[in-house]
């Protein structure tokens, strides 16, 4: 009878379970797994740092609906990969981390890169397990895939000791596993559907908040139908952007703070009242706000603010239920209300406030002037990746998303370092879409060496660096005594475009905004990766905010 080794069995199982992409770095003991993955027809991308590989795996998970795999070596490789596990758990995105491990028979002896890997992965996982028999590999892979996408999605971990990777079994003895079906979709109770609609009908100042849970559940058709039918104003969360078109007339994006503070009924759809949503508490929210909450996770209901109506289940299924129930109702939210008017006035005032910065052509430029050209140039079907503080925050308000799951950023965990991993994931998951990644100069430092990866695989990603020479802000000039440099400062005028050129891509340096559009056009026209490094004024920042970012 034919024998099969652990690496081959793992690769075949992943392929069977619909895992299309593996990101990793080879070394002891996982080399055979990468080779077997390629043999099995999984696309393998060799990365430069395990953190980026782990970020890439979860981004393809979110974008494709099946978890990405991340392959790392034992010990330090697994420790680096934990960054991605933590981020995936926080974002509720699926991924599988596969860690090589020292051979079982050396456990406790001080083996090369020996670590308690299952233990350290567990706090960041829905499921973590060490594979102890070669013939049970398909069983554990099925479990890891199922746990990653069923219920609230998240991260899983499989530990693969060297002797399991190289171990062989009779193919006849292998325990076959069923292929994990698409996540089952479950609905809310009919009386709660009615209660939700009654509550919305009673609202004077209603607001729908659309989160990335709706993106994950592929609910865009249902949510669009719901908003168009009810005519309710809506706010997208940072990565919920695009489930509804940002340019939809009912979007309150330009009057976000006002809408949150004044709404009397909020329908929270696949979003959490965490720090991003100011915990749902005053002064950012109305003290008496009534919450309708839709979430797949029962434990998430009433977090921070008690929900008056709980709709527990799948986002797409439940909004479909609401749409059905609306067929027998006449009600919709009227067009000419003081609420609409107040939001329109606030949006106009906010637009007026930033207009002088948009119109300012002086060099070096500011964020808003840079985004004027970037937005006008941005291909409508692009996947947009944003990373940095000001760059990401301002970019989110300026760059519109017309469709779901086309925005990736630092997310729930506020992670700096996701940028190039997400960029590479977007490029392989969406080979037909342009990928545009806008980084701050500090942000690109975390994952910049992955530019080599993008060049090696000829991924035609377009990277823009908004370069103010520091974290938050930079300096006009460095003092002679460098020991006194402020902690936030980075080299003035760093040539990030030359990093791109070093690996064979195309680089552009722009120090006057009048040259920006031409550089962006040339970058897009270039048949391969390109980087446009835009020098910003060292003190460029956000427009003045009514509240500090961490206000509750
Ligand atoms: P955002 O950052 O966009 O506000 P969060 O990540 O905070 O989004 O919240 C997303 C929520 O969506 C999570 O509480 C998660 O449980 C929920 N969720 C995940 N999958 C689904 C689904 N299929 N249907 C409904 N809700 C979901
Ligand atoms: Mg900066």
Image (spheres, rainbow, N blue to C red):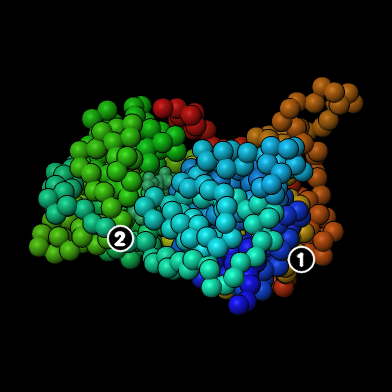
**Which residue position holds label 1?**
456
- Between marks 2 and 1 in the image, the one whose residue lies nearer the viewer: 2
403 left or right, relative to 533: left
522 left or right, relative to 183: right
Residue at the image point whose x is 83% and y is 55% from the top: 498
Name the foreground residue: 170 vs 348: 170
Name the foreground residue: 60 vs 226: 60
503 left or right, relative to 176: right
Name the foreground residue: 8 vs 279: 8
Residue 19, by quadrant, is bottom right
The residue at the far front in this view is 1
* Spot occupied by residue 270 in the image (x, y as percentages of width and height): 35, 49
Q: Residue 185, labelled with which disc?
A: 2
Residue at the image point whose x is 86% and y is 26% from the top: 482
Which is nearer the N-term, disc 2 or disc 1? 2
Residue at the image point whose x is 39% and y is 56% from the top: 150
| Label 2 CB-ligand 1 distance < 8 A | yes
* Spot occupied by residue 1 in the image (x, y as percentages of width and height): 60, 77
Q: Residue 117, labelled with which disc?
A: none
Quadrant in which the C terminus appears:
top left
Residue at the image point whose x is 49% and y is 66% from the top: 175
Tag 1, which secondary structure?
Answer: helix
């Amino acid at each position: 009878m034919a024998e099969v080794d652990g690496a081959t069995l793992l690769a075949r199982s992943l392929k069977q379970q619909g895992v299309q992409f593996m990101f990793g770095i080879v070394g002891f003991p996982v080399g055979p797994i990468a080779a077997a993955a390629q043999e099995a027809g999984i696309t393998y991308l060799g990365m430069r740092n395990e953190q980026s590989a782990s970020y890439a795996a979860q981004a393809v998970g979110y974008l494709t609906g099946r978890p990405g795999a991340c392959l790392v070596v034992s010990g330090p490789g697994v420790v680096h990969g934990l960054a991605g596990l933590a981020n995936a758990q926080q974002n509720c995105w699926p991924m599988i981390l596969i860690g090589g491990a020292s051979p079982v028979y050396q456990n406790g002896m001080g083996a090369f890169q020996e670590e308690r890997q299952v233990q350290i992965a567990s706090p960041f996982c829905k499921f973590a397990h060490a594979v102890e028999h070669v013939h049970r590999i398909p069983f554990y892979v099925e479990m890891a895939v199922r746990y990653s996408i069923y219920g609230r999605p998240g991260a899983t971990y499989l530990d693969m000791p060297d002797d399991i990777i190289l171990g062989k079994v009779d193919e006849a003895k292998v325990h076959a596993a069923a292929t994990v079906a698409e996540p089952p979709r479950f609905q809310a109770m009919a009386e709660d559907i009615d209660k939700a609609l009654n509550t919305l009908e009673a609202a004077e100042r209603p607001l729908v908040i659309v989160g990335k849970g709706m993106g994950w559940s592929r609910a865009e058709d249902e949510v669009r139908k719901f908003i168009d039918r009810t005519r309710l104003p809506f706010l997208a969360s940072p990565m919920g952007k695009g489930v509804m078109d940002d340019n939809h007339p009912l979007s309150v994006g330009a009057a976000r703070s006002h809408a949150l503070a004044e709404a009397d009924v909020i329908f929270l759809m696949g979003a959490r009242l965490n720090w991003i949503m100011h915990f749902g508490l005053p002064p950012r929210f109305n003290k008496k706000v009534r919450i309708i909450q839709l979430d797949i996770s029962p434990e998430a209901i009433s977090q921070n603010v008690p929900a008056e109506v709980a709709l527990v289940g799948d986002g797409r299924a439940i909004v479909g239920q609401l749409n059905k129930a609306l067929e027998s109702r006449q009600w919709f939210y009227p067009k000419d209300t003081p609420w609409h008017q107040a939001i329109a006035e606030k949006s106009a005032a906010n637009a007026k406030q930033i207009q002088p910065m948009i119109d300012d052509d002086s060099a070096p430029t500011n964020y808003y002037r840079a985004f004027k050209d970037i937005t006008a140039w941005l291909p409508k079907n692009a996947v947009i990746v944003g990373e940095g503080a000001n760059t990401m925050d301002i970019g989110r308000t300026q760059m519109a998303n017309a469709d779901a799951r086309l925005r990736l950023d630092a997310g729930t965990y506020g992670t700096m370092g996701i940028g190039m991993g997400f960029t590479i994931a977007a490029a392989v998951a969406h080979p037909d879409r342009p990928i545009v990644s806008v980084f701050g100069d500090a942000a690109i430092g975390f994952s910049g060496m992955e530019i080599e990866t993008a060049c090696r695989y000829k991924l035609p990603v377009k990277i823009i660096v908004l370069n103010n020479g520091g974290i938050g802000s930079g300096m006009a000039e460095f003092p002679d005594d460098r020991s006194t440099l402020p902690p936030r400062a980075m080299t003035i005028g760093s040539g990030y475009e030359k990093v791109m050129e070093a690996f064979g891509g195309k680089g552009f340096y722009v120090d006057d905004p009048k040259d920006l559009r031409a550089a962006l056009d040339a970058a897009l026209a270039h048949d391969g990766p390109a980087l446009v490094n835009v020098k910003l004024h060292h003190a460029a920042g956000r427009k003045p905010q009514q509240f500090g970012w961490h206000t509750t």
